[in-house]
Image (cartoon, coloured by chain):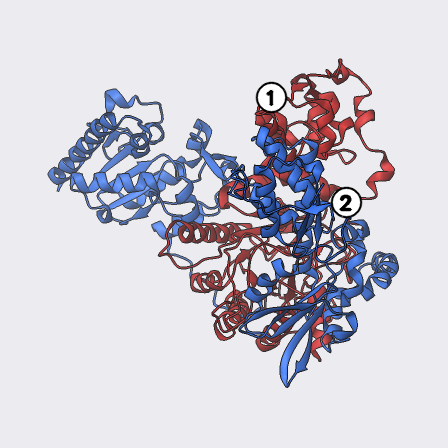
Amino acid sequence: MDISKKLQILADAAKYDASCASSGTVKRNSLGGKGIGSTEGAICHSYAPDGRCISLLKILLTNACAFDCLYCVNRASSNVPRARFTVEEVVSVTLDFYRRNYIEGLFLSSGIIRSPDYTMEQVVRVARELRQTHDFKGYIHLKTIPDASDELMAEAGKYADRLSINIELPSETSLKTLAPEKDVRAIRRSMGRMRNRIDEAQDDKRAPRFAPAGQSTQMIVGADAEDDRAILATSANLYSSYRLKRVYYSAFSPIPDASRILPPQAPPLVREHRLYQADWLMRFYGFDAGEIVAQDTGHLSLDMDPKLAWALRNRDRFPVDVNTASRSQLLRVPGLGKTAVDRILAARRVRAVRLDDIPRLRVLVAKVLPFLIFPDHTPHRLIDRADLKARLVPQPRQLSLL
Amino acid sequence: MLRIRLADETDFEGWRDAARRLLTRGVPPSDVVWTVGEDAGDLFTHAVPQDDTPKDTGEPVSVPRGFVDLAKQVVLHNDPQRFSWLYAMLWRLRKEPRLLTVSVDPDVVRLEAMAKSIRRDIHKMRAFVRFRKTAIDDREWYVAWFEPEHHIVAANAPFFKRRFTTMNWSILTPSMSAHWDGEDLAFSPGASRTEAPADDALEDLWRDYYASIFNPARLKVDMMRSEMPVKYWRNLPEATLIRSLIEDAQRRTDTMVATGPKDANERPQKLSASKPAAKPEGGTIAALREEASHCRACPLWAPATQTVFGEGRPEASIMFVGEQPGDTEDLEGRPFVGPAGRMFDRALEDAGIERTRAYVTNAVKHFKFVPRGKKRIHQKPAMPEIRACRPWLEREIEVVQPDLIVALGATAAQSLFGKAMAIGENRGRLLDAGQGGPPVLITVHPSYLLRLPDADAKEAEYKKFVDDLVVSRRALDKAA
């Protein structure tokens, strides 16, 4: 099989992994080295028409897999064509693409063949070859295999910027049903092992290098019946337990040769988008997983962003005075992002912020108006209006643009 | 009207020198015209005289932090007005030194927007330059054609040098070109597209990748366009595919949904047969540990990483029972290895007890916590959880058969005695917990010592803790 055919099969097999990030690692460059590559902040070198960034060469070493995860295009029982790269082929495609400035580096994963250790050993060999033989200084993200040995894990962390293991589904019950060979306990133990090594490498300069860009994971949305509350609770648990850099949410998307038990359906893209917004609220806006989702439904509302939905449920907390409210209060105002809040705080140390300043913050005036008090404008009982939701929620047509 | 002529489009030094002189001479922004290069200029203006009046010092003018960096960026902008806007800002800053922090001020907003546009242009150049491999004088050379929006080539070239140090490369643009031969970074005047190579054999492989990584079931064309504006497409080899990928997406998705499931692959991949792990012998701690790793007797297992079972000498004469594993213990799967464990080890040593001679475990075998950002906040186990976990502790005692048990803290005491035991009045002496078991000595949990804020109190409490441990050691010695 020629390299082009292999690349088509093994990129197609990798595309359901949402992560393509090349962020968060230490600064490196190739000055004085024997090879090429640098890391100075994430760069997206291209975008596909699915709106996703193409930063890394994201491929599988092989899409042959002994696991039969029903949601996965590469599962053992699927009839998709199989291919396998040699280590040398991955190394040379990575370097050839990098030299032409197509990519920031490599994101390598693999189907499970022979045994977890055998598979992991193959993945690690590619990274070792790139770093040691070619002095490659670009970004490397490796997928780790849950039951792989400590030695292989340590070596993977030595070469990789980021490591990841997918939690796949929010609950153990779902995982048992849809991915019978996967073991959530083994996944969590591996995440714990990685956190220990990452912490150690960060705290102790003499400790061996280990994944300076941390670890991440992915959860599939819509393949099981778990609600958004369960998903966000799992995320909050993972962030706090293993200090993950990111939890990626991936709307369950139709695959060729789908399983009978999990037939193809349109991917829940709006739901995925709302989960990312909620995830942001947890990580940067001081929200708790428990308060983001409405008590009655267990789901985020699809027709408005989760911060606006929260504010409409908590009207008694508004309006707040733009010139005296605390940072955490302002962060909870619908329509105000982190940057806008920081600008308000900086500006009001010098002079009062007025209503006509707001458009210059690149903020939607109509959206923030009911929630803020200005020296020259008080939202007269706007907050109590029954039609507030109708006034603020974008019309359905606009939703399709998400 | 004064006319200032700057050497070139990105002449920050020239602008700064002139601005200093103008400012010390008190020339208002409305009286200055800024031009670049050898243009004819406005007949009614004249160059700023280099006069020798004492005021015209050209000395550094103090400006707020951040202004110089902002100005260096704004100078790269393609807007002809950029020099006068910068000078106007400098003029205002004399009277309003904190102006730059008023990020809602129109003048500040304008300069910041310009700087942002520069940063974006620099970033997009780093992203969308596409090298094509060719040969120049028999040397392998990578050449790109790129059309930046602003005057960023010289500012951005060092990035490409740091990244492609061991390659020879040239980036040609309409206004200026940059070249690296492995040793020197050089600049030459603008070039035309036809001077760059028209193709590279590898681009087909790149397009294969681009087409294959695209998921037709999640079309988000607007998102792609906002991050990769159409103006860049003509220099991106993969962009020729965009139209057909979009047009075909719906059909491909419909086909996947319509085709639906097929019969399972008849020859699935299989793992190589591996020897199943040997089952530990029954009636041992190893067997209990294995059994407990699947425990679901209370809900604490789900959010935790793993069961943390006891460990130590299976025939130990002394058994220590703590409350529950903490953050570190949960990750490592071993009891008393975190901060409280280190405090415990120190106290054991001071009391003359070797930890290797003891068996160490917890009343509750899973970590109970609530997530808070990147931390887990410890929660005291409740009565139902202690009760659910108690059979494990009882079986550990049964196997180890210690001569003495030390309960570290209230939870351990509650589990062992089956009721709340006040530590203050019961600590430091051998008690009978009933049911014919070994005597139990109650003391505090080492994490209690960690939480004491006052150093003197800490020291005093630590001493009392060690004293309690000494009592238990003496009791053991007597029994032996």
Q: Residue furthest top?
A: A380
Q: Which residue is mark 1?
A: A325
Q: Secondary structure at mark 2?
A: loop
Work out whether disc 2 and disc 1 sit on a shared chain: no
A190 w.r.t. A232: above or below: below
Residue type (three-letter) at the residue carrying disc 1: Ala
Chain B: drawing colour: blue
Towards the viewer: A381 or A35: A35
Q: Are marks 2 and 1 in contact (CB under 8 Å)?
A: no
A374 w.r.t. B342: above or below: above
Q: Quadrant of the N terminus of chain B?
A: top right
How packed mark 1 is, by other alpha carbons closer than 10 Å (few <14, some 14-19, many 20 or more), is some
Residue type (three-letter) at the residue carrying disc 2: Phe
The residue marked by circle 1 belongs to what chain?
A
Towards the viewer: B455 or B36: B36
Q: State which chain is coloured red.
A: A
Q: Residue furthest front?
A: B52
Towards the viewer: A298 or B314: A298
User: Residue A148, position in %: x, y?
Assistant: 49, 62
Q: Quadrant of the C terminus of chain B?
A: top left
Report how far apart the C-alphas of labels 2 and 1 lie in the structure. 53 Å
Residue B44 image label: 2
Q: Residue furthest left?
A: B478
Q: Kindly identify the residue that appears in the image at 13 percent across and 36 percent down.
A: B474
